[in-house]
Image: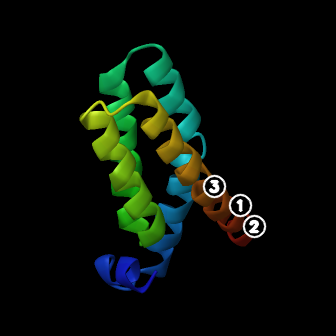
Amino acid sequence: MKSALRRVLGNKQLYLSMLRNFVDQQKFATSKIIKAIESSNWDIAELLGHNLKGDSGNIGATGLLQLAEKLDTAIKERHPRKEIDDNLDELQIVLEKLINRLEQQLT
């Protein structure tokens, strides 16, 4: 959080807006990625993974960022589906916890 606040020059209102946007944009990220992969729409899956990675970094969610980077690489390099699914499962757990906490704190 501290690094994200530094990025917005300590503007707490802007940071809160970023957090709200993160919840809105990323709440269903993993299900959207799965749907794209199942439709063989790898470009969309890659874009969704990349956006999740960027948004995670922007809000300072470093643990989620690392998982999103791992997933982004697996999708880009077309790793085996089981590996991508395992990455998605791991990421989903962390993402859900973060989204739930943000939704509780931002209401």
**Residue density around tag 2, few if under 14, some if 14–19, many if 20 or more, within 10 Å:** few
Query: Callout 3, which amino acid?
Result: Ile
Query: Callout 2, which amino acid?
Result: Gln
Describe residue 28's horizontal placement relative to residue 11 as left or right.
Answer: right
Q: Secondary structure at mark 1?
A: helix
Q: Secondary structure at mark 3?
A: helix
Instruction: Give the residue pinned by disc 3.
Output: 93
At which x and y percent is residue 29?
52, 40
Instruction: Give the residue pinned by disc 1.
Output: 100
Residue at horizontal 51 percent and vertical 37 percent from the top: 85
Dot 3 or dot 1: first in sequence order is 3
At which x and y percent is residue 28?
59, 40
Residue 17, which numbered label? Answer: none
Describe residue 85's horizontal placement relative to residue 45 as left or right.
Answer: right
Q: Secondary structure at mark 2?
A: helix
**Residue density around tag 1, few if under 14, some if 14–19, many if 20 or more, within 10 Å:** few
Residue at horizontal 29 percent and vertical 30 percent from the top: 78
Q: Is residue 46 visible?
A: yes
Query: Callout 1, which amino acid?
Result: Asn
Q: Is residue 61 visible?
A: no
Dot 2 or dot 3: first in sequence order is 3
Q: Is residue 89 above or below residue 95?
A: above
At which x and y percent is residue 58?
36, 65
Instruction: Give the residue pinned by disc 2.
Output: 104
How far apart are labels 3 and 1 at the CA level? 11 Å
